Amino acid sequence: MRHLLLALPFALLPLVAAQAHEHDHDEHAHDSLGAHEHGVASLNVALDGNLLELQLESPAMNLVGFEHAAKSEADKAKVAATRRELEQPIGLFALASGDCETREVELESPLFGDADHEHEHEHEHEHEHEHEHEHHEHEGEHSDIQAFYRFECASSAKLQQLDLSELFKRFPATEKIQVQLIGPNGQQGMQLTPAQPRLSF
């Protein structure tokens, strides 16, 4: 299996999400926690032994400030700066306490262009793209940014929480993040905000 996030029983998580967000529509619950909504992002988290995986999905508006293709130099610079920020996840998710090292980073968005999809795992990406195309077809003109991270944490027992304070600080248009978590204590669904940015395992 490609990712822990795919191998673990995420089919059960919409139930958790539904409990946490009773008013959400369930037609999208299998995919993300609702339709494209500015200010709102979703985060899937899986911690299994020393392996931690995170999958962040956000409207581009939350991270870049726009959703159209970057044509001006200013827009291109903003997209490049956002990409650099997302490529440094240890700081964004405050993973220092678990002695975590980044093993894989994958960023996907129409704003990044096709050339940026060339990773060392190209053959594995083909399967991912099938899912991406299905997902984007019903979003019309909306652009999302998806980030997948895999970490190896030498001291995973010390990894008590994720702290998204830095992510909210760097991307202030992100008002809330809907989280689905599978960890040592089972499954949880919760909502993080700038005032409540921490997630306990």
Image (spheres, grey):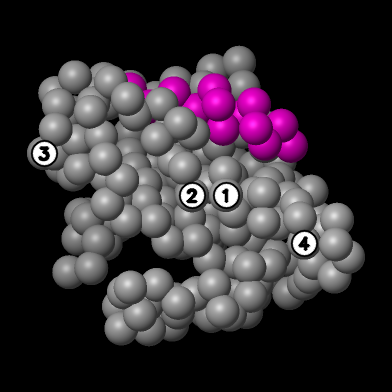
Seen in the image, is 56 located left or right of residue 170?
left
Q: Work out whether residue 20 or residue 149 is closer to the camera in this orientation and state it.
A: 149
Residue of label 3 = 49
Mark 4 secondary-structure assignment: helix
Q: Position of residue 105 (x, y in %)?
A: 39, 56
Residue of label 1 = 84
Mark 2 secondary-structure assignment: loop
Viewer-side label of 3, 4 = 4
Mark 3–mark 4 Cα distance, whole angstroms, equals 39 Å
The numbered mark, 3 or 4, whose residue comes first in the sequence reads: 3
Tell whether label 2 touches label 3 (CB within 8 Å): no
The numbered mark, 3 or 1, whose residue comes first in the sequence reads: 3
The correct choice, above or below, for 40 with respect to 130 in the image is above
Amino acid type of disc 1? Arg
Residue 88 among magenta residues: no
Q: Residue at x 59, y 53 (%)?
A: 83
Q: Residue at x 23, y 68 (%)?
A: 2
The numbered mark, 3 or 2, whose residue comes first in the sequence reads: 3
Amino acid type of disc 2? Glu
Residue of label 2 = 87
Residue 128, can we see it? no
Residue of label 4 = 76
Seen in the image, is 46 located left or right of residue 16?
left
Mark 3 secondary-structure assignment: loop
Seen in the image, is 1 located left or right of residue 141?
left
Magenta residue span = 161-173
Mark 3–mark 2 Cα distance, whole angstroms, equals 24 Å
Bin the neighbour count of mark 4 within 10 Å (Cα to Cα): few under 14, some 14-19, many 20 and up: some
